[in-house]
Image (cartoon, helix red, strand yellow):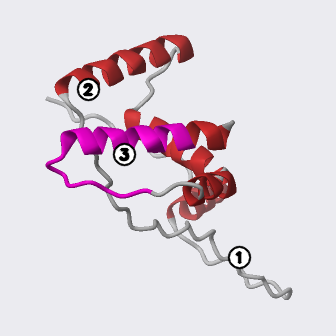
Amino acid sequence: MPRKRVEEQPYDPISADLVREATVIQRRPISAVPRVAIAPPVPPKAEPTITKRFVLTRSEDAEVNAFLVRMQEAARTKVPLGMLVRAVLWVLMEREEALLAEARGQTFRLPSTHDRLGQSEFEERWRTSVRRALG
């Protein structure tokens, strides 16, 4: 069986130079103008978090969940309870002076955790004070 004939192409110096430039990593010449190094932006360091909790009865939990569903339907997006509580807390903190004045005008005493009636009365007094402070 005859061998395939090798077809040689004439040497092309331009093509050879292009191949060398494309395949060899070359150092760029150092310019006479000094370059200013720009540091990349440093992302802010995340602040450690603390979890706050509160207890609800089953019926209160059902009411809160129904409330959240109504809020989500109105907003047409998910509304997490934690985000809503944070928003309300910031509103309260903005009205701190009025809330402090309400607290100074009353005598609060935290009842025992076993005194359910006392706990509900204590909570109701705070609810009333907050309503007045938010006016």
Q: CA distance from mark 3 to mark 2?
A: 20 Å
Residue depicted at x 14% and y 49%: 114
Q: Does 49 appear above or below 67? A: below
Residue 121 screen position, x and y as percent: 34, 40
Residue closer to the observer: 14 or 65: 65
Q: Does 33 appear above or below 65? A: below
Which of discs 3 and 2 lies nearer the camera? The answer is 3
State if disc 2 and disc 3 touch (CB < 8 Å). no
Q: Which residue is mark 1?
A: 38
Magenta span: predominant SS is helix
Residue 13 screen position, x and y as percent: 63, 60
Q: Which residue is mark 2?
A: 61
Sooner in the amino-acid sequence: mark 3 or mark 2: 2
Q: CA distance from mark 1 to mark 2?
A: 53 Å
> Residue 105 appears in which quarter of the rendering?
bottom right
Residue closer to the observer: 26 or 5: 26
Q: Is residue 81 left or right of residue 103?
A: left
Sooner in the amino-acid sequence: mark 1 or mark 2: 1
Amino acid identity at mark 1: Ile
Amino acid identity at mark 2: Asp
Task: Provide the residue span drawn in magenta.
Answer: 108-129
Q: Which residue is mark 3?
A: 122
